[in-house]
Amino acid sequence: MKQNTLKIYNTLSRKKEDFEALSPPHVGMYVCGPTVYGDAHLGHARPAITFDTVNRYLTHLGYKVRYVRNITDVGHLQGDADEGEDKIANKAKLEQLEPMEVAQQYTDSYHRDMEALNTWKPSIEPRATGHIPEQIALVQGILDEGLGYEVNGSVYFDVLKYNEKYQYGKLSGRVLEELMSGSRDLDGQGEKRNQVDFALWKNASPEHLMKWESPWGVGFPGWHLECTAMSSKYLGKQFDIHGGGMDLMFPHHECEIAQGNACNHQDPAKYWMHNNMITINGQKMGKSLGNFITLQELFTGKHNLLEQAYSPMTIRYFILTAHYRSTLDFSNDALKAAQKGYKKIINGLRIAKNLEYTSEGNEPLDENQVGQVEQSIANAFRAMDDDFNTAQAIGHIFNLLKKINSIYTGQLKSPIFGKEVFDKMISTYLVFVENILGLSEEKSDNQQGLLNVLLKLYTEAKTAKNYDKVDEIRSALKELGFVVKDMKDKIDWAYEE
Ligand code: ZN
């Protein structure tokens, strides 16, 4: 494992901290996954890509990452609160399906979209419904600690009691007194002693679709409980990194911390990471605002806000061009710019894979050029070490790409870098683009075959000095998004940028 200086911004301490794994080389990372009752949208893409990149970079540094991302298939109620209908059960009623059919359908479509975005699969992908006994045991543990209470078959977490010994609100920076005074206006508090209390177990009405036997009667778990149950089962009572979108910080993650401390007397995670939100044309994304865009709509261009389709790799690249803690605004102009950037990177990938070091010409070593390449390499890794700053890393990778392109076009000769630095430049570019940023070439199945045929015709026409034909083929390829490259000793092609 590489000795490194990785720094992570910890939401819990509100500062960048040196990353130290609890039991190196193993790293445990838990990320809150989707509630599977609808198609994956832009709001799913950012955490998935952010924590995929964290996983990829930690792996690159030599850590063995156990990445757990759950599937929420029960207990997440509409409005994210303790009252209302289960999101999955509601969808099941609307579509006249079994709740598990709904969960399966949207788990499958989520997997399809995540694969298109080239995210690595989590090491374990547990489901809430598969961990009911573990959740019941946690509720019992919290009751045993005197930090929960039962009312009419439901069990609630006693936030005030908890706060006597621990600090509720330390992750989100919320102050309990303010939370309580803010909730005074609400009509009644139902079964809860305090509005700030949250459900651990809910009593199920006879018509409720998903329910289980428990010591408190037939019911179902509260939304926050599953993550505590599954993270502690697979990663231990305390693990390294807990991730998720900023919107989950309160109440979801705050409640996870409270549950973890109540049961295990320690914070569940050492580092809490939160990706910032995305906006669309400057506005928050929301179903009521008409700017709710699913990933499939982006990939196909079928949404009235979209001027064209944007490929999965364009979306991935676009998300990586901002640091994960910055907001990111989706607009057609920004996405078109990202498409150009992505194609430049991929053209570079094709060139870098085929570029050979030639010692012809006896060019002497150029210390200045060597220094620039070494600086770009060091800076790219330094950016990733600084809280996974992909935005800056991409800038340094583009500096390497400039050198690679200059060698390709013959402006620079490879010997001026020396064999060692040349090889390091190529391998760094490939490792960064493919392994760390997770960008891959998107091509149709028959693309290469078609290009080979057309380039053969192009070469024949050129040899025969049939320049009308040459122009005709060149513009036909341009229509299809390719540029013919007349090299000194061969004909090559590139994506049009
Ligand atoms: Zn969660």
Image (cartoon, helix red, strand yellow):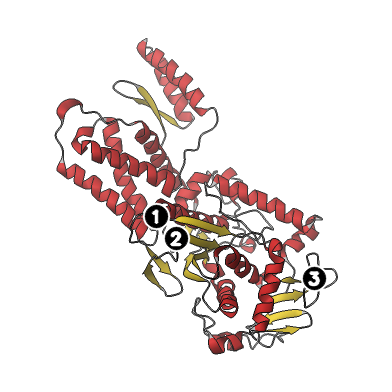
* Location of residue 184 by image quarter: bottom right
Point 66% across, 53% down: residue: 107
Which quarter of the figure is the N terminus placed in? bottom left
Query: Quadrant where the C terminus lies?
Result: top left
The crowding category of the residue bearing disc 1, from other C-alpha atoms within 10 Å (few below 14, some 14 to 19, many at least 20), is many
CA gap between label 2 and label 1 equals: 8 Å
Amino acid type of disc 3?
A: Glu
Q: Which residue is mark 1?
A: 390
Q: Amino acid at mark 1?
A: Thr
Pointer 2 residue: 324
Please name which of the two marks, 1 or 3, marks the residue nearer to the observer: 3
Mark earlier in primary sequence (2, 3): 3
Q: Which mark is residue 213?
A: 3
Q: Is residue 108 left or right of residue 53?
A: right
Return the x and y of residue 321 as percentages of the image width and height: 41, 53
| Residue at 60% in and 57% down | 292
Q: CA distance from mark 1 to mark 3?
A: 47 Å
First in sequence: mark 2 vs mark 1: 2
Q: Are marks 2 and 1 in contact (CB under 8 Å)?
A: yes
Rendered location of residue 421, percent (x, y)? 24, 41
Kindly tell me whether residue 298 is visible in this rendering.
no
